[in-house]
Amino acid sequence: MNDTYKKKTIISPSILSADFANLQRDVEILRDSGADWIHVDVMDGHFVPNITIGAPVVKAIKPYAQIPLDVHLMIENPQNYIESFIDAGADILTFHYEATKDLTEDVIGHIKSQDILVGLSIKPKTPVQEILKYLLMVDMVLIMTVEPGFGGQAFLQECAEKIPVIRQNAPENLIIQVDGGINRDTSQICKELGADSLVAGSYIFKSDDIEEAIKSLRN
Ligand code: DX5
Ligand code: ZN
């Protein structure tokens, strides 16, 4: 049996598909339905063509989450916002390699020095080889399997092929997370390829039974 199957997959439902007028309720539903983390998609209208939420909303949901807040920064100049997201209650802070490039190592160091988990993400068109040199420095790599910016897009299978490349080059405890187009079928593909954590928005929030939907991704 592959080692991957011995570990419990970390399910991180994305509140991008929640009802923003009822965020407290939806965060509590996720927490009580077996979610491991809550994934918070932060978009700035520059790095991606959409605007969502910022640190004040992270702070507002923090008391209701009671499970780690997995904050995915899809923003330019993430280095300028690290403290505000940590103060707001982020437990995992993931930023995009494409938003930092030469600054990547500094931003990783900055987040790590604040004693929370640091994640590095790549967009579909970014070759995985470009981030191999950072694998010893980060806690998590987030592989985007859709173009970041919107929920509800179709899974790009070719991006999932990056998972084993990361796995082969990473220390055993590196968390590999996949985000975009995850559902019952695509979650199986990602787990077989070696993913440790799955983000899902529309699949979970469109389902009639959120607890079952979360279980179906994990098992
Ligand atoms: C997309 C976001 C995702 C999004 C996933 O830019 O990073 O986290 O919420 O949504 P689904 O699961 O609907 O593809
Ligand atoms: Zn995300």
Image (spheres, rainbow, N blue to C red):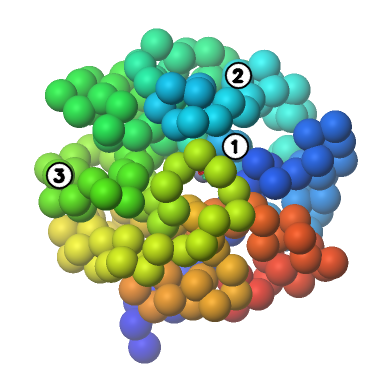
Q: Does the residue labelled 3 lie within 8 Å of ligand 1?
A: no
The secondary element bearing badge 3 is classed as helix
- Image quadrant in which the C terminus is located: bottom right
20 lies above or below 174: above
Which of label 3 and label 2 is nearer to you?
A: 3
On whether ligand 2 comes within 8 Å of the CB at mark 1, the answer is no
- In the rendered image, residue 87, in percent from the top left (x then y), is placed at 57, 15
Left or right of residue 77, residue 57 in this image: right
> Which residue position is annotated with label 1?
40
Q: Quadrant where the N terminus lies? A: bottom left
Residue carrying label 2: 55
Q: Name the residue tied to disc 3.
A: 130
Taking the spot 67% from the left edge, 16% from the top edge, the residue there is 56
Whether residue 166 is visible here, answered yes or no, is yes
Lower sequence index among marks 1 and 3: 1
Query: Given the image, on which type of amino acid does mark 2 rest?
Result: Ala
Whichever of labels 1 and 2 marks the residue nearer the N terminus, that label is 1
Dividing the picture into quadrants, the one containing residue 191 is bottom left
The image position of residue 160, as x and y in percent, is 34, 65
